[in-house]
Image (cartoon, grey):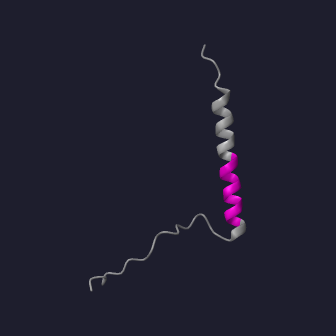
Amino acid sequence: MAKHNYAFEKRQKEIAKKKKKEEKRLQKAGIDDSQPQDVQPVSENDDK
């Protein structure tokens, strides 16, 4: 039987905790994470 990789589990928990903390920080800042910020509307008459 393979040895249990506790370091991997610990790292995954840390990553999840950081992600949750970042989402909470963004929510407090008033930024909705569900809306992409880098998408801009493209107009058809950009050739000038």
Identity of the residue drawn at 30% across and 84% down: 45
Residue that appears at 52% across and 67% down: 36
Farthest residue, direction top = 1
Q: Is residue 29 magenta?
A: no
In this picture, residue 33 sits left or right of residue 44 = right
Q: Does the stretch in magenta take in 25?
A: yes
Q: Quadrant of residue 8?
A: top right
Find residue 10 and report its horizontal and vertical position in percent.
69, 35
- Considering every residue shown, the one lying at the far left of the view is 47
Is residue 35 placed above or below 23 in the rendered structure? below
Seen at 69% across and 65% down, the residue is 27
| Spot occupied by residue 1 in the image (x, y as percentages of width and height) | 60, 13
Q: Quadrant location of residue 5?
A: top right
Residue 33 image-quadrant placement:
bottom right
Q: State the predominant SS element of the stretch in magenta.
A: helix
Task: Please tell me which residue lies in front, 38 or 1.
Answer: 38
Residue 14: image x %, image y %?
Answer: 68, 42
Circle count = 0
Question: Residue placed at 65% from the left, 37% from the top?
Answer: 11
Quadrant occupied by the C terminus? bottom left
* Residue 40 placement, left or right of 18: left
Closer to us: 43 or 11: 11
The answer to whether residue 42 is left or right of residue 48 is right
In the picture as drawn, the residue positioned furthest to the bottom comes out as 48
Q: Position of residue 3 (x, y in %)?
A: 63, 18
User: Which range of residues does the magenta coloring cover?
Assistant: 17-27
